[in-house]
Image: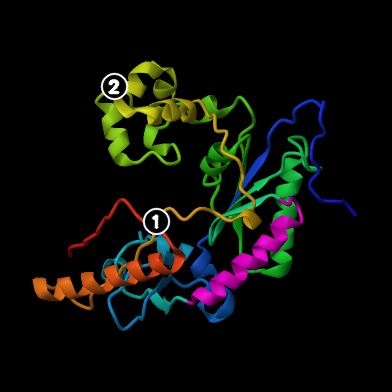
Amino acid sequence: MLDRRTRRAGVGKTPLERLVFHIDMDAFFASVEVMCRPKLRGLPVIVCGKPTTRSVVAAASYPARKYGIRSGMSTVEAFNLCPHAVPVEGNPGQYIYVSLEMLRIYKEFSTIVEPYSIDEAFVEMTGTEWTWENCEEAAYGIKERMHERFPDLTASIGIGPNKLVAKMCSGFKKPDGISIVRPGEFTKIFGDLPVNEIWGVGNKTAVALSLMGVTKINELAEFPVAMLRRRFGIMGEILHMMAAGRDDTPVTPYFEGMPVKSMGHEHTLPADTWDIAEAEKVLLRLTDQVARRMRKKGYLGNVISMRLRFS
């Protein structure tokens, strides 16, 4: 039996070539619901709030996605696209349980595991028995252990020399795929893609870059970093590095905890309203919920944002 404990490189040894996995569960919430209710298998399932009220799609099964249903979409839109979609109220406790069980599986392959969200994780393989020569074997090993524990769940795995590349390639072969981008291959594989395909680059940044004549990733990698710095500040240098597939961000082990960057609450009204007093009541309640959490955790904030969705 193979020993999968992480081994650290000793002082004076040749630096190891970094190897990072990004594991992304496929249609996680919906897949867990199908696992718990086998009669839903093959149906267009949407996970949302109470089916009797208006809510937002938290996840959609792959049969539902064929109709164009996506997470973040209102259930009204979802039913317009697929009138026979099956709404299921989410079960956060069940999702957390499965997520923690998956964490235990990842720890069999490396002690350095960073849960990125409830259905995603980075695994630092550098310094373990897993190398670029046998990384695909490790990915299949994770899938095998997952299938033993949860036969109905699948994951897509991206393998790269850092978190950025691993994250970007994990979506290549969804669902249930394995994608590998080896050191030095980033520009060849991603170079001709639009800049907003870079993990973390949003549409606003993409528009700003297009005004500078930069629309593709390889164009951003070749653009003068000084000009990017003048336009975006320190973020300009980071954009230039990312366009070249460089990322020194460490995989932060789950036991060290992750810094909380924001706190928020949201609520979907049962019906559209133009009543300002009604909207202010909702806003007051949400604000109070956020402030209460911040006081309990001892946090201060310096940016307040509000999101308002119209019909």
Q: Taking 141 as reference, is 44 left or right?
A: left
Would residue 294 be counted in the magenta stretch? Answer: no
Between label 2 and label 1, give the one nearer the viewer.
Answer: 1
Asked if residue 192 shows in the view, the reply is no
Tell me the residue that label 2 is attached to: 213
Q: Quadrant of residue 44?
A: bottom left
Q: Which residues are magenta?
A: 91-111
Quadrant (top left, top right, bottom left, bottom right) of the C terminus: bottom left
The residue lying at 41 percent from left, 59 percent from top is: 299
Tell me the residue that label 1 is attached to: 262
In this picture, is 215 found above or below 96? above
- Position of residue 278 measured from the top left corner of the image (x, y, whole percent): 14, 76
Given contact means CB atoms under 8 Å apart, are the residues at marks 2 and 1 in contact? no
Q: Taking 134 as reference, is 164 left or right?
A: left
**Secondary structure, magenta segment, majority class:** helix
Q: Amino acid at mark 1?
A: Ser
In this picture, is 52 found above or below 261? below
In this picture, is 172 found above or below 247? below
Q: How many marks?
A: 2
Q: Quadrant of residue 160?
A: top right
Q: Quadrant of residue 254?
A: bottom right
Secondary structure under tag 2 reads loop
Disc 1 residue crowd, few under 14, some 14–19, many 20+, Cα 10 Å: few
- Position of residue 175 measured from the top left corner of the image (x, y, whole percent): 55, 55
In this picture, is 9 found above or below 90? above
Secondary structure under tag 1 reads loop
Quadrant (top left, top right, bottom left, bottom right) of the N terminus: bottom right
- Position of residue 111 measured from the top left corner of the image (x, y, whole percent): 73, 52
Q: Earlier in the sequence, mark 2 or mark 1?
A: 2
Residue extending farthest bottom: 52
- Position of residue 187 measured from the top left corner of the image (x, y, whole percent): 52, 25
Would residue 93 be counted in the magenta stretch? Answer: yes
